[in-house]
Amino acid sequence: MHLQGIEKVTLTALDLESARKFYIDWGLTLKDASSNALLFESLNGAQVSVHASTDSQLPNGFEKDPTLREVTWCVKDQATLDHFTSKLSSLPSFEQHPGLIKFKDPSGLSVSIAVSRKKELTLKAAVTNSWDQRQRINQPSPIYDKATPIEVGHIVLFVANLSESSAFYQKFLGFTLSDSYPNRGHFLRCTPNGGHHDLFLLELPDKRVGLNHIAFTVRDLHEVFGGGLHMSRCGWKTELGPGKHPVSSAIFWYFHAPTGALVEYYADEDELTPEWIAREITPGPTMFAEWAIKGGIDGHTRRQIEAQAPSGQFMTDTPK
């Protein structure tokens, strides 16, 4: 019995109106709003709950606001929830609520597990014409005006003790190690068969805990580009991207969010099975990004930020 992924992330914002605009521009659907909270959904029903940092109903934070306050992982049915209830009930922080269990991880982050509400989706995505497989016939590849994220794909957390935190998620929640930066970071997936990672734990030299980023899955690399260009046109700041991760093979684009840390569009990550052998990888700039654009691409000129825009309709219009 395994977790199925991320059901919900609960975040804080110092400015709810800025958060509202950001996540609508990001491509999520606003499902509910009040004076101190906003609820967004992705295409498959994964939720992003954004609260004013003064909301007294929130779990305690593990770093200064704005940040992540809780992660809700999902299971397919009540029997699987009962399995985790039995497995986790010995934890000092364990709480049982109707349809939900809660506890703290070693960093003090509130974690919960619930039966999933997410929907099964059938979506068309781009196919690639490689040298040996010509799959796209008599049709151009897609161009997206903006992104509509499918789900919350993974989270990345800073932890004070990598070995302790990684052991907790593997022992109690059934995560599998996909790859590692020895003594620095563990890429973990919540099912033996699945995407490269649902959770990445990273230990910094200063041992601080907190949120690094939340990643949203989109259809294909073209939607990463379309979504990033749209966010750029809306005035949101790129941290890094577009680019490509060599560890997971994913195409990415990171933006600064009003809810703290970063958010990421990504697509085309590696799919792993139990036969996969976890690698030990020496970290470094070239291992984080095979290639990447610092500062992003301007959504109007479609060129790197501050690069000179083309003067004609085609590059060949430029006089020699």
Image: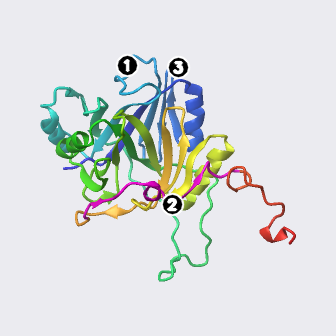
Which residue appears at 47% of the width and 55% of the height? 285
Q: Pointer 3: residues within 10 angstroms few (<14), some, or many (20+)?
A: few
SS label for mark 1: loop
Q: Looking at the image, which is closer to me, 283 or 22?
A: 283
> To which residue does mark 3 refer?
35
From which residue to which does the magenta span run? 277-299
Q: Position of residue 112 (x, y in %)?
A: 28, 34
Tell whether position 281 is magenta. Answer: yes
**Residue type of the residue flagged with mark 1:** Gln
Compared with residue 166, is residue 67 higher up or lower down, i.e. above or below?
Answer: above
Q: Position of residue 233 (x, y in %)?
A: 68, 45
> To which residue does mark 1 refer?
57
Q: Looking at the image, which is closer to me, 117 or 196?
A: 196
N-terminal-most mark, 3 or 1:
3
N-terminal-most mark, 3 or 2:
3
Q: Is residue 218 visible?
A: no
Q: CA distance from mark 1 to mark 2?
A: 37 Å
In this view, the mark in front (3 or 1): 1
Q: Mark 1 touching mark 2, by CB under 8 A?
A: no
Compared with residue 308, is residue 213 higher up or lower down, i.e. above or below?
Answer: above
What's the colour scheme? rainbow
**Residue type of the residue flagged with mark 3:** Ser
SS label for mark 3: loop
Q: Name which quarter of the figure residue 98 lies in.
A: top left
Which residue appears at 62% of the width and 45% of the height? 231
